[in-house]
């Protein structure tokens, strides 16, 4: 299973980016798909998750600004990021969990300048 994240870049504070994650298998098969963020010296942390058959979960720091969505037909998961802040800077990773198995894609860098 491969997860390919894209859409990162450099943006000014207040701007928007949309991250995409393309999966090599149907995303419907995953119990949970999500986006994680990692900054140097810190653990990778969950930003947003979408649960099959359930709702979406967000880190408190991004609630109201980020939206996670999934397109089963395109085998893709997206993260719309609005009102970006410098503290949103980091490497964003796509994650998919199927049962007890977790899959990770290569990250995409997001840099928000002040």
Image: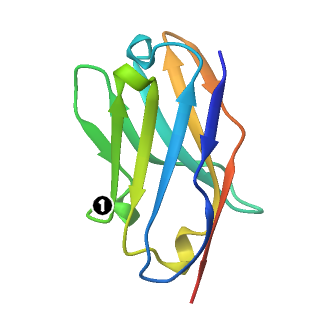
How crowded is the residue under tag 1: few (<14 C-alpha within 10 Å), some, or many (20+)? few
Farthest front residue?
Answer: 74
> Is residue 29 toward the left or the right of residue 114 in the image?
left
Q: Position of residue 2 (x, y in %)?
A: 66, 22
Residue 40 x/y as whole percent: 76, 63
Left or right position of 42 against 96: right
110 or 54, nearer to the observer:
110
- Residue 50, located in which quarter of the rendered image? top left
Residue sitting farthest toward the right: 41
Determine the residue located farthest toward the left in the rendered image: 54
Q: Nearer the viewer, residue 19 or 38?
A: 19
* Residue 95 placement, left or right of 90: left
Residue under the point 28% across and 39% down: 56
* Badge 1 element: loop
Residue in the picture at 45% in, 23% down: 75
Q: How many marks?
A: 1
Q: Residue at x 44, y 35 (%)?
A: 77
Figure quadrant of residue 41:
bottom right
Screen quadrant of the C terminus: bottom right
Could you tell me which residue is drawn at 52 percent across and 25 percent down? 96
36, above or below 90, in the image: above
**Residue in the foreground of this view, choosing between 81 and 46:** 81
Q: Which residue is mark 1?
A: 63
């Amino acid at each position: 299973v491969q997860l390919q994240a894209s859409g990162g870049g450099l943006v000014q504070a207040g701007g928007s980016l949309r991250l995409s994650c393309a999966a090599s298998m149907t995303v419907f098969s995953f119990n949970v798909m999500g986006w994680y963020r990692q900054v140097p010296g810190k653990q990778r942390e969950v930003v947003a998750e979408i649960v099959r058959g359930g709702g979406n979960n967000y880190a408190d720091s991004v609630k109201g600004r980020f939206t996670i969505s999934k397109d089963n037909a395109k085998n893709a998961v997206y993260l719309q990021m609005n009102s970006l802040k410098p503290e949103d800077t980091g490497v964003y990773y796509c994650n998919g969990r199927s049962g007890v198995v977790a899959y990770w894609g290569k990250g995409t860098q997001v840099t928000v300048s002040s």
